[in-house]
Amino acid sequence: MVRFLTLAMHAVKRAPNGGVRFRLDGRGLGTLSTRRTGCEMADGTMRAWSVVTAGPVEENGLRLVEKPVPVPGEDELLVQVRACGVCRTDLHVSEGDLPVRRVGVTPGHEVVGVVAGSGAGVAGFATGDRVGVAWLRRTDGTCGYCARGAENLCPSSRYTGWDADGGYAEYTTVPAMFAHRLPEAVDDVALAPLLCAGIIGYRALRRAALPPGGRLGLYGFGGSAHLSAQLALAEGATVHVMTRGAAARQLALGLGAASAQDAYAMPPEPLDSAILFAPVGDLVPVALRALDRGGTLSIAGIHLSDTPPLHYETDLFYEKQIRSVTSNTREDARAFLTLAARHGVHATTHSYPLTRADEALRDLKAGRFDGAAVLVNDL
Ligand SMILES: [Zn+2]
Ligand SMILES: [Zn+2]
């Protein structure tokens, strides 16, 4: 096992050109051989969005500010952001639906960027490599959950854009062990939504235990759902979509869904499995009633409004199951990115300049686009 926790990084030293040079100091390194990697910036500060006050996005608690360019830890990469997808979790972080874990955090965890520097303990990445930065940022690797392959449940897990600054910025950092290699053929904007929406949709689909050739219901049809729908269809499922937006229903039918109707409507046939993507607890009994005997409802969101009381006979009896979905493992990410490339799973994207991230979040909240919004770095 590689030891590199004793490595300290000492920043920040003013460089002769007026910029900032990061210096890596190998004090306490012992016998670990080092390559003194460092990185130089033209400027020591960058522009980044910051959740100054968690609250409704209409009230401008999310602000574009100047921050120091982050200094990568000794096992981390510094990543220059090219594109960053907009996830509903970013909205939950900005609005305080998720508790504040880092004051002034920069949201964003669907980052496609290039390596701009690294800590001295990093091997296997070079400056200029394209990498993906996703939600799961770090786990302890030692607890019982990690040991049994359930690192998504690690009590020590840390998350990009919640515990640490994310991708709504010029630069971000990521532990190298949690950076994702990306398929070369797909462009930055198309890749970004795969890094959370896609991976979570994949895990939600697997948690829904859809039998081969089964009937799958999707409640809500945003960034995550439209990606898992494509994967389910490619694997032979019949897909029914229940969502409020007319444009989203059109998108669903265009992708090959067998039917598309209002969120509270019954699908035309009983479902073997359902996935609740909309963060609406009222839909839990609606989806359970649409399940056939023995069916499974998988709840994909990190946040859900309260569920109404369930009726045992109609909602749960006949061995219906409810399963939540918590984050994802790196193995989920690898599996999904491989399958997405194989089946041509592609995101329907709406690009916004990164300087208009607040507008993108307001539009997401209001349901003003279908598919996934992606911020393109113009900072
Ligand atoms: Zn753990
Ligand atoms: Zn996300």
Image: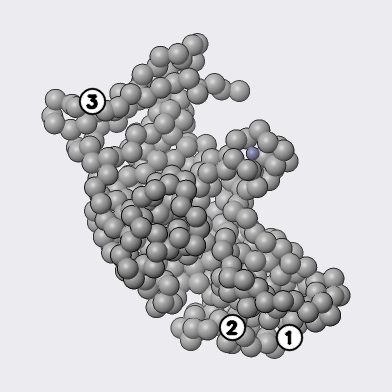
Q: Residues within 10 Å of mark 2 (few under 14, many from 20)?
A: many
Q: Is the Cβ of the residue at disc 1 closer than 8 Å to that at disc 2?
A: no
Q: Which residue is nearer to you in this view: 70 or 267?
A: 70
The amino acid pointed to by label 2 is Ala
Q: Which mark is residue 13?
A: 3
Q: Secondary structure at mark 3?
A: strand
User: CB at mark 1 closer than 8 A to ligand 2?
Assistant: no
Q: Position of residue 322 (x, y in %)?
A: 74, 67
The amino acid pointed to by label 3 is Lys
The answer to which of marks 1 and 2 sits earlier in the sequence is 2
The answer to which of marks 3 and 2 sits earlier in the sequence is 3
Give above or below for 153 relative to 224: above
Residue lying at 33% horizontally and 24% vertically, measured from the top left: 10
- Which residue position is annotated with label 2? 263
- Which residue position is annotated with label 1? 269
Q: Position of residue 217 (x, y in %)?
A: 66, 76
Give above or below for 339 relative to 6: below
Q: Which residue is nearer to you in this view: 141 or 338?
A: 141
